[in-house]
Image (spheres, rainbow, N blue to C red):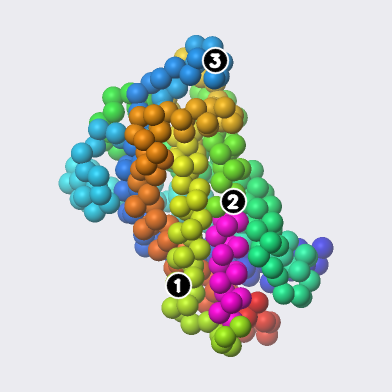
């Protein structure tokens, strides 16, 4: 219990939250471009017996009629059509969600690791298991925040797909209120199932990051800023590539504002996820599962690299002041 409620875990959690907020702010426009490139909501299609009878699902990703297909061209198009600050639309709810999410994840990850490892050297297998458990805790606690920030981030965007239903929220609190009132409280957990599958993303990321860090520390006493930046980028690039198709489905379910039947049933079962993946392959081929990956890799790898750099430096500085062991030497 002392390890779970320790100052060390709190330092890791705060440093992780600050690092993620800093990195996301710097590279936020890339995430905006990625969300548009993903082609988030296509034509309505009937699932039939895949889900409840008569349920109509608008499937697969944001704006399929957009002509621009590269990150920089999409950003230029967004600025031209929607204004200079449009790439930062939805920044505050994303940062708020990210702060809470990373605080929970880093706190849980480092607390569980402290309990399990107990001063010994960790292993790749332990890092993966701890990362997975931390991810499950994080998903269950923070999914409502991510549902709301996805809605707010896309609000006001000029889509070329006439099937997307516009929303009108006046901030985070109003979005929570409207979603609960119109769709029910469970709508706040839309996309939870693929999110639970996606806990492998941070688990894989931390497994590779911690593993690469241990290998480098065998050859030198301390990691440089460049070392941290590079291994952070590599770890995130691997995790993103492996889990990207599920991230596409997650975005669809989180947005949730499809033209459904009046019952508006919540999506998210394994059958629906497989159906959405199958439909994307049928319409765009196997590479359709990776549409927008260029923007996603660019954004996530750079963001993760900067996040880990800020995280490691902040924890190292704090531990030095507190007289504790440096985070870079774990």
Compare marks 1 and 3 and give the one earlier in the sequence.
Answer: 3
Residue 268: which quarter of the image?
top right
Specify whether 200 is left or right of 80.
right
Q: For the C terminus, which image quadrant?
A: bottom right
Quick one: label 2, few (<14), some, or many (20+) residues within 10 Å?
A: many
Q: Which residue is mark 2?
A: 200
Q: For the N terminus, which image quadrant?
A: bottom right
Secondary structure beneath dot 2 equals helix
Look at 65% across and 48% down and name the residue there.
136
Secondary structure beneath dot 3 equals helix
318 and 246: which one is in front? 246
Quick one: label 1, few (<14), some, or many (20+) residues within 10 Å?
A: many
Write down the region rendered in magenta: 202-217
119 and 181: which one is in front? 119
Instruction: Specify whether residue 168 is in view.
Output: no
Real-space CA distance between mark 1 and mark 3, rounded to the nearest whole angstrom:
48 Å
297 and 148: which one is in front? 297
Real-space CA distance between mark 1 and mark 2, rounded to the nearest whole angstrom:
21 Å
Percent coordinates x, y for residue 64 in the rendering: 29, 34
Is residue 323 depicted above or below 141 in this figure?
Answer: below
Percent coordinates x, y for residue 230 in the rendering: 45, 72
Asked if the residue at tag 3 contacts the one at tag 1, i.e. Cβ–Cβ closer than 8 Å, the answer is no
Real-space CA distance between mark 3 and mark 2, rounded to the nearest whole angstrom:
30 Å
Task: Give the label on residue 49, or none.
Answer: 3
Q: Main secondary structure of the magenta part?
A: helix
Is residue 15 depicted above or below 326 in this figure?
Answer: above
Look at 53% across and 43% down and name the residue there.
145
Secondary structure beneath dot 1 equals helix
Q: Which residue is mark 1?
A: 229
């Amino acid at each position: 219990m002392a390890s779970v409620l320790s100052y060390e875990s709190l330092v890791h959690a705060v440093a992780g939250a600050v690092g993620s907020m800093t990195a996301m702010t710097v590279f936020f426009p890339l995430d905006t471009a990625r969300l548009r490139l993903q082609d988030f909501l296509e034509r309505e299609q009937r699932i039939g017996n895949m889900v409840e009878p008569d349920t109509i699902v608008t499937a697969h990703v944001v704006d399929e009629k957009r002509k621009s297909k590269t990150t920089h061209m999409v950003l230029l198009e967004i600025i031209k059509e929607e204004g200079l600050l449009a790439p930062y639309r939805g920044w505050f709810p994303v940062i708020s969600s990210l702060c809470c999410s990373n605080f929970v994840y880093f706190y849980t990850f480092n607390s569980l690791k402290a309990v399990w490892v107990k001063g010994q050297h960790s292993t790749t297998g332990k890092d993966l298991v701890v990362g997975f458990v931390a991810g499950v805790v994080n998903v269950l606690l923070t999914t409502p925040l991510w549902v709301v920030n996805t809605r707010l981030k896309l609000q006001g965007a000029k889509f070329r797909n006439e099937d997307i239903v516009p929303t009108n929220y006046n901030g985070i609190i109003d979005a929570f209120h409207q979603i609960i009132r119109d769709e029910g409280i469970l709508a706040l957990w839309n996309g939870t199932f693929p999110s639970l599958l996606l806990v492998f993303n941070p688990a894989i990321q931390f497994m590779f990051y911690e593993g690469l860090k241990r290998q480098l520390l065998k050859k030198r006493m301390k990691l440089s800023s460049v070392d941290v930046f590079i291994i952070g980028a590599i770890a995130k690039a691997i995790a993103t590539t492996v889990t990207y198709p599920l991230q596409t489905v997650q975005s669809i379910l989180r947005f949730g504002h499809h033209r459904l039947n009046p019952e508006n049933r919540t999506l998210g079962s394994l059958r629906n996820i497989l159906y959405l993946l199958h439909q994307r392959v049928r319409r765009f081929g196997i590479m359709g599962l990776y549409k927008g990956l260029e923007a996603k890799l660019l954004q996530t790898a750079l963001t993760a690299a900067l996040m880990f750099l800020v995280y490691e430096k902040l924890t190292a500085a704090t531990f030095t002041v507190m007289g504790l062991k440096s985070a870079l030497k774990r």
